[in-house]
Each structure stands twice: as structure tokens, then as C-alpha cells.
Image (cartoon, rainbow, N blue to C red):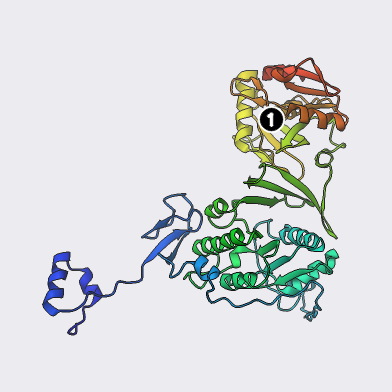
């Protein structure tokens, strides 16, 4: 140890009083503190001083990443108040695209998979990448731009040539959309502030943005939160609508912390099931309108096309009339949708029978099976049970209980449910069938599609005839069991 200096490692082994006495004796300054670091959960945003394999706040595993405890500068201030941003260059969708050469390999399938030279390859174990987020936004941007609004599309993942090729395939090359590939948040804010505020700004995607004022890699929680804050501040001051595209994790959540969902005004999920050409745009948060609204689209060669009648989409005439099918008169937000629920109940040779569910809550199925066995005497404990809803639709409302029970009973008895009948109602743990909302909308949709009868809770039956549909009320689930005349146990 030299005069006037103190080794930091030696000081850490001394007590507070011993260190103070040493400073007075040798007349030196206190050593400079190390750069403060913290471990931040990339799922919930919780910060801890020590690393751990499991986040103590949300319980997520392997989500703690070392980051600077405090940013050197606020990204919102750096980005909005001048800062170091440079102006980004924009192109049009009709600009000339130089076709990159292809290179042959010995394996034709691998050559097709690799595509063009210079394209980036990414392996993913989930179906959501490539679902059509960029296609949907490009179509919306082009439609708005053709109406005379100024639209800016910033792609951080794809080159401008890739976006223009998609626009050419969709027939949108003539749309006056300003296309760029900038990812530096300061440059983005500086560019947007150098011209009249656009009506729509699309950032694809938020995981690629980064700020010089935050000493972490792009995609980390600090970068996501800081860059999103800067864009939200710009949107509030300019009046522009800013769309942030985010990927999803393996659990189906938006990649990054929930704090981003709290910061924005609207959260939309774009989802589908693997192998289906249909896509569902679902609103889970909306400060300017109702939530749980959906839009149904079909993926075609010319792009995404809206499905005008989703009820017809989720009904299969070939399966109706077969044992194990029942039609639910459901609601998605304010839109009534008729959905065919299919069930298969078969004797099991396993010690623990299987329970498989697609498109419904597995815990809800377990509860319904328990009610059927405990309250109605239907012994399903030794049977395998499979339940599914068609297409890409996820059933979340309790009104699906009665239709699911009808499908299970139909399959178990081997007798088809009436083809002209719809079901809706919530089943309680006592076996009672409870009323649900939006009865009129459900019945109108069923009558429009040719259904003549509805099995409904007793409290909404009324005079027995509504909207041209005969109503058959049930107060207890065992009344529905009697409909199928189940064989004795």
C-alpha cells in the first residue's frame, strides 16, 4: 500500500471505526466507490443486490440479470430534449429493391430454409413469431396513409428491402408510408421531432430499441422501460399514435415486464393456434373503450382478411349431430359468437386417466368433472377426457360450463345432442346453473344462424320464447344429465 492510497480489498476487512482512524492517520481521501450494480428480474422488474436463480417477487426462474443500479441519464430527457440523436433516413414502399443473389447448397430443403443471402436466421420454439403482426400493421399503415395521413414505420428487425417485398406481395407499394430502420431512441425522437407530427408511428419491435443513457443490452428491462417511456412522452406532447410491437415469452406473455403494459393505453394480443390460418386480435386493456373485444382474421396469400361472421367460422356442420358436440352461445366482449365444443370420454386403461384440454381452462374442466361426479352421480373417474374448441379461439367466460357439460354427457352416453340447440350458463359447485349476461345478444346470434332452441338458466327463461328461439330452462345440472338418459352405473 503506497502513501496516499488505500487498497479497496484491505478496507473491506476493516471495521467502520478502524477505517476512519486509518483515514485520519495517513491523511488520504476515501476511496472511490465501485460502480453500483443490481440484479433486475426481466419478468417483473424487481431489483435485488444479490443474484438468485429465482426471482423473490414473481417466482420466475433464471430471470435475474445484472444491470446498472441507476442509469447515467434519463432516456426520456436524452431523447426528447435534444440529446445526441441523428436524423434517420426514410424510404418509400415503392423504392427499388435489389434482389440479393441466392447460393445453392447440396441440400435443397436447407437452401429454401436459408432463403436469401444476408438474411438473418432465428430459431424459435414457439408458434407466435411469424403469426402476422408485421403484415397486419403494414396493412393498417398503408390504409391510413392512402387516406392522406402521415405514417412512419420503423422496423428494427427487418431491412427495408424485406418490408418492401412484403408490401409488393400485398399490393401496397403505392402507399405513401415513410419507412426506416432506426433503433436508437434518441435518433428516433430527433427524427420525429424534425417534421410535422405523424398520425401513426409503428415501432417493430420495442425489443430492438436502445438508449445511450442506459448501460444495458437492448431488450433488457431497463432499456424496455426507458425507451417506452421516451416514446410515450413523445406521443403525449405531439398527439401522435405510437404502436409498440412486442414479442411473447414461452408463457404467452409480452416479452419484458408488466410495467410496460401499465404504461401504455391499450394492449392487444395477436394470437392463433398452430396449423390454423385464422388469427384473433384480442384487446386485454383499453383506456378508451371496452376490453375483451376480438377481431377475427384469415391469413391468405394477399394478406390478412377480416372474417365478417366469426360464428360461422367456429361451427362445423359435418361434426354437428355426432356424440360429444355442443354449441355454445358465447360472448367475446360485446360480440356474440357461437362456438362448437367437442368432447371425447373414453374408458381408460391407465391408473391415472388423462385430462387434455385445448382452448379452455384445464382447472375449469376439473371442477366441472368433479361436480358431475359428486352432484349428478356421473362416474367419470375411470375415463379419459378430452375437450377442445375449434380454430384459434380461447374460451374464458364461465358461460361455457353448460355447453361443456352437454358435450361431456353426450360423449359419455354415446347419444348426440340436438343439432338445433345452443347452450350457455355457469355451473356452480353445488350443481346449480347460474345466469350469465348478454342473453339477448346470444339468442339473436343463435336465431340468425338457424338454431331453434336454447338450454339456459332458469332465471333468464322468461316466457319460454325469445327472439324466435324456444327456451328450455334448467336450474340444476342433473336436469341436463336427465336429457341424455345416461345408462346406470
Q: Is residue 485 visible?
A: no
Measured as percent of width and height from the top left, residue 175 is found at 82, 67
Measured as percent of width and height from the top left, residue 360 is found at 67, 38
Q: Quadrant of the C terminus?
A: top right
Residue 68, picture quadrant = bottom left
Q: Quadrant of the N terminus?
A: bottom left
Task: Name the outermost residue toward the bottom.
Answer: 2
Q: Residue at x 58, y 72 (%)?
A: 184
Measured as percent of width and height from the top left, residue 415 is found at 80, 25
Q: Nearer the viewer, residue 151 or 250?
A: 151
Residue 237, picture quadrant = bottom right
Q: Mark 1 highlights which residue?
A: 399
Q: Residue at x 63, y 20 (%)?
A: 431
Relative to 65, 337 lies left or right: right
Measured as percent of width and height from the top left, residue 132 is found at 74, 58
Q: Is residue 279 visible?
A: yes
Residue 176, picture quadrant = bottom right
**Residue 28 drawn above or below residue 280:** below
Relative to 56, 192 lies left or right: right
**Residue 161 drawn above or below residue 137:** below
Q: Residue at x 65, y 19 (%)?
A: 376
Amino acid at each position: 500500500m503506497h502513501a496516499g492510497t488505500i487498497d479497496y480489498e484491505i478496507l473491506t476487512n476493516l471495521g467502520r471505526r478502524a477505517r476512519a482512524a486509518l483515514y485520519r492517520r495517513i491523511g488520504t481521501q476515501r476511496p472511490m466507490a465501485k460502480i453500483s450494480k443490481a440484479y433486475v428480474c426481466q419478468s417483473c422488474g424487481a431489483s435485488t443486490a444479490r443474484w438468485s436463480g429465482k426471482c423473490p417477487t414473481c417466482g420466475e426462474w433464471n430471470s435475474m440479470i445484472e444491470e446498472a443500479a441507476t442509469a447515467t441519464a434519463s432516456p426520456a430527457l436524452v431523447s426528447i430534449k435534444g440529446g445526441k440523436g441523428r436524423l434517420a433516413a426514410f424510404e418509400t414502399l415503392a423504392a427499388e429493391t435489389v434482389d440479393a443473389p441466392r447460393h445453392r447448397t447440396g441440400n435443397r430443403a436447407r437452401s429454401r430454409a436459408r432463403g436469401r443471402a444476408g438474411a438473418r436466421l432465428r430459431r424459435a420454439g414457439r408458434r407466435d413469431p411469424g403469426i402476422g403482426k408485421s403484415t397486419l400493421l403494414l396493412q393498417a399503415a398503408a390504409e391510413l396513409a392512402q387516406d392522406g395521413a402521415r405514417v412512419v414505420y420503423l422496423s428494427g428487425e427487418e431491412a427495408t428491402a424485406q418490408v418492401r417485398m412484403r408490401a409488393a406481395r400485398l399490393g401496397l407499394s403505392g402507399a405513401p408510408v415513410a419507412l426506416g430502420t432506426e433503433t436508437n431512441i434518441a435518433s428516433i425522437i430527433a427524427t420525429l421531432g424534425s417534421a410535422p407530427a405523424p398520425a401513426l408511428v409503428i415501432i417493430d419491435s420495442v425489443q430492438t430499441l436502445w438508449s445511450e443513457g442506459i448501460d444495458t443490452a437492448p431488450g433488457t428491462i431497463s432499456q424496455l422501460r426507458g425507451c417506452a417511456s421516451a416514446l410515450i412522452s413523445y406521443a403525449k406532447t405531439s398527439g401522435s399514435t405510437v404502436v409498440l410491437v412486442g414479442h411473447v415469452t414461452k408463457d404467452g406473455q409480452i416479452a419484458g415486464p408488466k410495467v410496460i403494459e401499465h404504461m401504455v393505453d391499450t394492449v392487444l394480443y395477436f394470437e392463433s393456434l398452430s396449423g390454423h390460418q385464422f388469427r384473433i386480435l384480442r384487446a386485454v386493456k383499453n383506456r378508451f373503450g371496452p376490453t375483451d373485444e376480438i377481431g377475427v382474421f384469415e391469413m391468405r396469400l394477399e394478406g390478412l382478411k377480416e372474417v365478417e361472421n366469426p360464428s360461422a367460422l367456429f361451427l362445423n356442420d359435418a361434426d354437428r349431430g355426432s356424440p360429444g358436440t355442443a354449441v355454445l352461445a358465447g360472448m367475446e366482449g360485446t360480440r356474440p359468437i357461437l362456438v362448437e365444443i367437442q368432447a371425447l370420454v373414453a374408458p381408460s386403461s391407465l391408473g391415472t386417466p388423462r385430462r387434455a384440454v385445448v382452448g379452455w381452462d384445464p382447472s375449469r374442466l376439473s371442477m366441472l368433472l368433479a361436480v358431475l361426479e359428486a352432484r349428478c352421480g356421473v362416474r367419470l373417474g375411470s375415463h379419459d377426457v378430452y375437450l377442445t374448441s375449434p380454430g384459434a379461439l380461447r374460451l374464458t367466460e364461465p358461460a361455457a360450463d353448460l355447453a361443456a357439460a352437454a358435450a361431456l354427457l353426450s360423449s359419455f352416453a354415446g347419444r348426440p345432442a340436438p343439432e338445433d340447440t345452443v347452450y350457455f350458463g355457469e355451473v356452480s359447485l353445488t350443481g346449480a346453473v347460474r345466469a350469465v349476461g348478454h342473453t339477448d345478444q346470444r339468442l339473436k346470434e343463435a336465431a340468425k344462424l338457424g338454431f331453434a332452441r336454447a338450454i339456459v338458466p332458469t332465471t333468464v327463461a322468461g316466457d319460454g320464447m325469445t327472439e324466435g328461439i324456444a327456451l328450455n330452462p334448467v336450474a340444476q345440472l342433473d336436469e341436463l344429465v336427465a336429457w341424455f338418459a345416461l345408462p346406470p352405473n
